[in-house]
Structure formats: structure tokens, C-alpha cells
Image: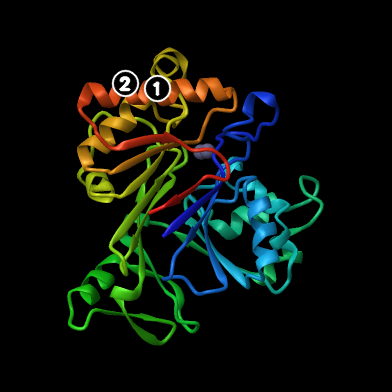
Amino acid sequence: MLVKFYGTRGSVPVAGSDYNRYGGNTTSLQILSKTIIDDRALIVDAGTGIVPLGKKLLREGASGADLLFTHFHHDHTQGLLLCPATFKQDFRFECFGPEEHGIGPYQMLNTIMKPPFHPVDYSLVSHHFRCKGIPNPNAHVLVMHPDRDAGIRLMKIDEFTLAENKHPAQVEIRGGKYPISECMVIRMIRTHHPEKAISYRFEERTTGRVFVFMTDHENTDAVSLDMARHLQGADVLVIDCQYTRAAYDRYTANFGHGTPDYCVRLANETGVRELCLTHHDPLSTDEDVDNILEEARVAARNCGYTGNIRALADFDEIEI
Ligand SMILES: [Zn+2]
Ligand SMILES: [Zn+2]
């Protein structure tokens, strides 16, 4: 599996010479895998990074994308407003995201794409979007198979577990039956954030590789059993590390974001092999992000975490 990052900034996009190395686009990433239909893309979040990503997908002739929203804060949605694929009528978007207080991906898009806030009303493009809200992420799983007739399916986790324990282990997607060993299995958990966000765990069953994306998640005192299971043995964990510990202690507690000491502790306790920091603060210059990375490396030495640690930049790629 290959993960390409098109936006690694949090909160608002930034530009200028202070951000040359890490970049200024907000969250958007593409996951490439043989478990995904050839000409479709698997994307997490639609921050401003989805603008160059969408441009690339159209250039490559992609027919559509499965778009998983972590949550609907602007830094994770606003790129879709000007993503070229949004206006390509035969580009099929299938959107998934949390559903809370009756608001899921459909209601979100219908709200943000509306005059006077945006020149194009969502109803003018909605025919090539399909949206599905996930009220209880922990109780569901997304399963993908690369067969042209399959694609992606949201299913109850108990139904999936039952199927997984049968011989042969198969899932039903759009009427066809497919071996789970050929699938991408995407598990979900809620993060600790003002708006409950979803962290996605991608299990590429063909290779056994595991990638966890967990942004917009704030330090917690204890590691819950659910969280430990969600992160257990991940080859790569990409996690929100917006603030230094000092800034957090001074004024950013309860803002919904993490610190280096916490991210390292979490990775260490759950056996994560590589730790990548993301959701950089818009006020953080390249040097500030370097300092956060250094703070994480010091924390790793203190607790004995030996995995690789890096701070992600826009357009970074990770082979997992
Ligand atoms: Zn955010
Ligand atoms: Zn957020």
C-alpha cells in the first residue's frame, strides 16, 4: 500500500516562505492499493490538499473516488468546493463520514455548497455524489474489493466478524461474494475531539499491512481498550501532533489536538512501528514543526520507543 499526502496542515491553509518545507494545504490523502478498483481512488478528507489531488486524478482518467471524512470541520472539507473532480459530471464520488445530530456527509455538503457562501449550489453537482452517514463508527466496518462489480461496502461489524470466522471467509458486496483475504478492511473508532471525528484503520489483507490515520485527536489520560485494539501493531500511524507540550499546558488544552509526548506514548504502548506527525498548526513555521519532531524524538528516548518518527509534509509518500 502506498499513501500519498496532499495536505498535512491543520485548522486553516497557509502559504509563504515560513512554510516552504512542510507546506500549507489542509488534510487530504490518497491510499493506493491493489485491493481498490483500478481506476477509482480511495481518499481520506477533503481539505485544500484535495484540489491538487483531484487535478491529478482527472489527468489520470480516474472514474471516481471513495471519500472518507474524518469529520466536517472546514479544514477537512473545504477543498471539495474547488476540487476539479467536484464539477466533472461522470466522476462518481462515494462519500462516508460521521453522522451526528442528523448531520452526515449529505447534509454537510448541502450546507457548505450554497450561496452566499459558495457560488455553486450542491444540488447542481449532487447527482454524481452518493453519501452515507455512519452514526456509530465503532459498530461498523468498510470493506473494499478490487473487482469491478464490487467496490466498497459499509457493514455492521458483527456481520463482518461472523463472515470472517466462516470457511471460506467471504463478504457480500453488491450481490457478489468475495474472499476477505483479497479485501481492504477499514475499521473505525471515534477520536477525542470537540466534534467526534473518525480514525480509520486500513488493513490490506493481501499483504497483512496496516495503516492507521488518526487526526483531530486530543491527548487522553488512559489508552482505552478500543483505542489499543485500533492501533495494535500498525505498521504506520499518522497522528495529530499540532502543539508542543508547553503550548498545550499553557492554552491549547481542549482544542482537540495532540502533543509529541502523548503521540509517542500511544505508539509505544500499542506497538506501532512508524509514527508520523500531522495536522501542523497554521502558526507553526517549518522550524516550529522541526522542534515538535525533536520533542517527539526526545520523548521516544525517554520512554524507550524505537520506531521511526517523522513529521509529514505536503506531497510526502509512504510505502507501507
Ligand atoms: Zn482539523
Ligand atoms: Zn477538527
Mark 1: give few (<14), some (14-19) or many (20+) Cα within 10 Å: some
Q: Is residue 28 visible?
A: yes
Query: Which element is circle 1 on?
Result: helix
User: Residue at coordinates 59% horizontally, 31% vertically from top-left?
Assistant: 21
Mark 2: give few (<14), some (14-19) or many (20+) Cα within 10 Å: some
The residue most toward the bottom is: 176
Quarter residue 48 falls in: top right
Given residues 125 and 299, the one toward you in this image is 299
Query: Which element is circle 2 on?
Result: helix
Compared with 153, 108 (above or below) is above
The x and y percentages for residue 282 are: 59, 27
Kindly tell me whether mark 1's CB lies below 8 Å from ligand 1. no
Q: Could you tell whether 287 is left or right of 260 in the image?
A: right
User: Residue at coordinates 36% horizontally, 34% vertically from top-left?
Assistant: 309
Q: Could you tell whether 155 is left or right of 147 in the image?
A: left
Given residues 84 and 128, the one toward you in this image is 84
Circle 1 is placed at which residue position?
294
The x and y percentages for residue 54 are: 66, 58
The x and y percentages for residue 189 are: 34, 50
Compared with 22, 137 (above or below) is below
The x and y percentages for residue 150 are: 45, 80
| Distance in Å between CA atoms under marks 1 and 2 | 6 Å
**Label 1 is placed on what type of residue?**
Glu
Q: Is residue 94 visible?
A: no
**Label 2 is placed on what type of residue?**
Val
Q: Could you tell whether 212 is left or right of 76 in the image?
A: left
Q: Are marks 1 and 2 in contact (CB under 8 Å)?
A: yes
Compared with 227, 204 (above or below) is below
Q: Which mark is residue 298?
A: 2
User: Residue at coordinates 73% horizontally, 64% vertically from top-left?
Assistant: 123
For the C terminus, which image quadrant? bottom left
User: Residue at coordinates 41% horizontally, 60% vertically from top-left?
Assistant: 1
